[in-house]
């Protein structure tokens, strides 16, 4: 059998928040292995630790203990500069709140992660155009967020997440601010990105959204209580 390379391998991850002398243990020994090109949803009730797990998977915060191999690199040994490098290279983020700059065109919003590099790379304009075409917004490049629907704004953020060609897309409640029709369109976009080989991880409390994934993990009280293959998954 062919073995699929792992893009994410976390082992016994614990996370404890310390505030004003109070310690709250939020993640209690999480181990997850994600093969390249997989499509995973993480579900669980509010307070289960989903967002905390997302910040760790996204290298936005460090675990209290445990190991995290991201595309073969041990994240726990990286300094802040190396963390932001690996984050920019490997991971595209999509959040519930779109975090787009208001009054700025879709084109410039998608360009934003490239502007953070020291100098805008060669071919940046074409990359932005391709990313916006990819999400069906090639005809809306000059529109500002205020001139776009919620679903279109979320597609701009997906285009922005793709701009550095990351192996992994991490989405936290990506349909949370959308009606069901726009939400379904966003999920279709993720389905297509996955069928092209991109690894997708979606955190959601919505079972309809979760059922798009090939594998569904349930988090409860900081632990994974179920890890199942979705029998209804169909590669698009
Ligand atoms: P979910 O995304 O599943 O709703 P979270 O990861 O947001 O869960 O939160 C899990 C638990 O961790 C909650 O009890 C929450 O109050 C606590 N928590 C989250 N962030 C912090 C923080 N920065 N400091 C202290 N406690 C936190």
Image (cartoon, rainbow, N blue to C red):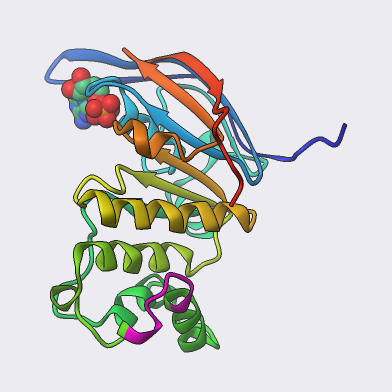
* Relative image position of residue 116 (x, y in whole percent): 38, 72
Residue 17 occupies quadrant:
top left
Residue 64 occupies quadrant:
top left
Residue 59 occupies quadrant:
top left
Q: Is residue 184 magenta-colored?
A: no
Residue 87 seen in render: no
* Relative image position of residue 199 (x, y in whole percent): 57, 47
Taking 26 as reference, is 59 left or right? right
Which residue is at a point 44% across and 34% down the rendered structure image? 211
Give above or below for 114 relative to 191. Answer: below
Residue 93 seen in render: yes
Which residue is at a point 19% across and 80% down the rendered structure image? 144
* Relative image position of residue 20 (x, y in whole percent): 11, 20
Q: Nearer the viewer, residue 181 or 47?
A: 181
Which residue is at a point 51% across and 52% down the rendered structure image? 191
Residue found at the very far right of the displayed protein: 1
Q: How many marks?
A: 0
Q: Is residue 135 magenta-colored?
A: yes
Q: Give the range drawn in magenta.
A: 133-139
* Relative image position of residue 29 (x, y in whole percent): 46, 13
Q: In which quarter of the image is ligand 1?
A: top left
Q: Nearer the viewer, residue 80 or 140?
A: 140
Which residue is at a point 48% across and 14% down the rendered structure image? 226
Give above or below for 213 relative to 67. Answer: below
Q: Quadrant of the image for the N terminus? A: top right
């Amino acid at each position: 059998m062919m073995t699929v390379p792992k893009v994410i391998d976390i082992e016994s991850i614990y996370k404890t928040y310390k505030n004003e002398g109070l310690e709250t243990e939020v993640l209690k020994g999480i181990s997850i292995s994600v093969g390249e090109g997989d499509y995973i949803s993480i579900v669980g009730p509010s307070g289960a630790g989903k967002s905390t797990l997302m910040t760790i998977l996204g290298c936005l915060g460090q675990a209290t203990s445990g190991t995290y191999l991201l595309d073969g690199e041990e994240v726990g040994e990286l300094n802040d500069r190396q963390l932001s490098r690996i984050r920019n290279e490997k991971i595209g983020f999509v959040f519930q709140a779109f975090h787009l700059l208001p009054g700025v065109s879709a084109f410039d919003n998608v360009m934003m992660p490239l502007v953070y590099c020291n100098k805008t790379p060669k071919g940046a304009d074409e990359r932005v155009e391709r990313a916006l075409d990819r999400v069906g917004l090639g005809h809306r490049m000059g529109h500002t967020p205020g001139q776009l629907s919620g679903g279109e704004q979320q597609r701009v953020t997906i285009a922005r997440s793709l701009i550095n060609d990351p192996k992994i897309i991490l989405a936290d409640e990506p349909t949370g601010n959308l009606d069901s029709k726009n939400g379904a369109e966003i999920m279709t976009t993720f389905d297509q990105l996955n069928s092209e080989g991109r690894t997708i991880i979606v955190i959601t409390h919505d079972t309809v959204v979760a059922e798009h994934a090939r594998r569904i993990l349930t988090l409860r009280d900081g632990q994974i209580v179920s890890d199942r293959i979705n029998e209804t998954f169909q590669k698009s």
